[in-house]
Image (spheres, rainbow, N blue to C red):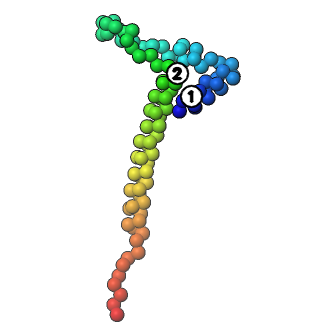
Amino acid sequence: MNAKIQAGIQFTSRVGGNANEEFKRKHRLRTKPRWLDESPENEHSFDICTFYRKEFKAVLDLQIVKFRENLSLCLQIVKSLAAVLQPPFEKSVT
């Protein structure tokens, strides 16, 4: 996953941008107010790779959940269709 993020950073620099500066500008450190936290300097600051790794995992998790929902719905439809299309079994009288 880090390789994909690094490839994105390199592509950004190739087209004339600076990914790290953009990240620092748009993803500021969000700390709790002083009245909630006496030592906000203890907050963890994400670097660009950690932040996007977290975002990738969230997107992948959402896609897996949606895939499972769609798969279960399809299986329910196929099961009911298979039950309807079964040939009738009759005992032959000889």
Q: Position of residue 19 (x, y in %)?
A: 59, 19
Q: Between residues 71 and 10, which one lies in front from this camera angle? A: 10
Q: Position of residue 89 (x, y in %)?
A: 36, 78
Name which residue lies at 66% across and 21% down: 13
Q: Between residues 78 and 42, which one lies in front from this camera angle? A: 42
From this view, report whether residue 78 is shown above or below residue 2. below
Q: Residue 71 vs residue 33: left or right?
A: right
Q: Position of residue 22 (x, y in %)?
A: 57, 16
Label 1, secondary structure: give it: helix
Disc on the earlier residue, 2 or 1: 1
Name which residue lies at 44% across and 42% down: 64
Badge 2: few (under 14), some or many (20 or more) residues near its Cα, within 10 Å? some
Q: Residue 21 vs residue 47: left or right?
A: right
Q: Position of residue 25 (x, y in %)?
A: 54, 13
- Cα separation, mark 2 vs mark 1, equals 8 Å
Quarter of image, res 7: top right
The quarter of the image holding the C terminus is: bottom left
Name which residue lies at 35% across and 82% down: 90
Residue 45 badge: none
Q: Amino acid at mark 2?
A: Ile
Residue 5 badge: 1
Q: Are marks 2 and 1 in contact (CB under 8 Å)?
A: yes
Q: Amino acid at mark 1?
A: Ile
Residue linked to disc 2 = 48
Label 2, secondary structure: give it: helix
Name which residue lies at 38% across and 66% down: 83
From this view, report whether residue 63 is shown above or below residue 47. below
From this view, report whether residue 85 is shown above or below residue 18. below
